[in-house]
Amino acid sequence: MNTRKDIALTGFMGCGKTSVGKALAELLPEYILIDLDEYIESMTGKRIPDIFKEEGESVFRDLEAHALAKIFIGEKSREATGEGRRKIISLGGGAITTEPCRKLLKEYAICFYLKASSNTLVRNLLNDPADRPILNPDGHRMTENSLMERVGQLMTARAPLYESAADHIIPTDGLAPNQAATQILATLRLDT
Ligand code: S3P
């Protein structure tokens, strides 16, 4: 097992980063699970949709990079004294769109891209009540057709970024979270 780096999970909204992260944390009890969106919400005291609404996407992207730097670098000294824990970080789906986040990931994490088809993403997103400002900018939920179109547009721009940020790609269509987590663990064991 690679003992040098934290683990980051990336992929489009609805690909299952949160549930795969939880399943992986059960398999790796020595790691602590951090959800980047939740970390930002506790760091700022604001909900993600409110940050988008009141301050805009670019402020949110700066916060993502700031939070990631705190997670990776801010706690390194504690790690050196053996107090820190290794981390599994479940990223927001757009974190890989900014250069500062991509650089931090390359330097500090083994990055897994949870790759799902547009059909799977749309199905999961339709069943997920979470408020995602990138998909519902006016606060209204999209219909299946408009969601399919928006996912297609965003994936065209983001797919190359997910692929290049990834150390490993896990195709997740048809996999339960614990199956994807088991594949990640097997990949980590080979990545020594
Ligand atoms: C975003 C994804 C969200 C959240 C924010 C922006 C994106 O996280 O960070 O709403 O740009 O893809 P999830 O991927 O966990 O939904």
Image: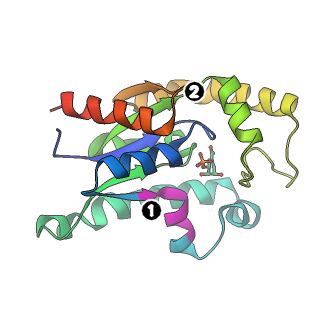
Please, what secondary structure does the residue beneath circle 1 have? helix
Disc on res. 116: 2
Residue 111 in the image, given as x and y percentages of width and height: 36, 37
Q: Residue at x 76, y 62 (%)?
A: 53
Task: Identify which residue, 17 or 161, lies in the foreground.
Answer: 17
Q: Circle 2: is it few (<14), some (14-19), or many (20+) Cα within 10 Å?
A: many
Residue type highlighted by circle 2: Ala
| 179 horizontally vs 127: left or right | left
Residue 94 in the image, given as x and y percentages of width and height: 57, 43
Q: Which residue is mark 1?
A: 67
| Residue 98 visible at all | no
Query: Magenta part of the protein: which range?
Result: 34-41
Q: Circle 1: is it few (<14), some (14-19), or many (20+) Cα within 10 Å?
A: some
Residue 1 in the image, given as x and y percentages of width and height: 17, 38
Please, what secondary structure does the residue beneath circle 2 have? loop
Residue type highlighted by circle 1: Ala
Relative height, residue 177 to residue 90 (above, below): above
Relative height, residue 129 to residue 111 (above, below): below
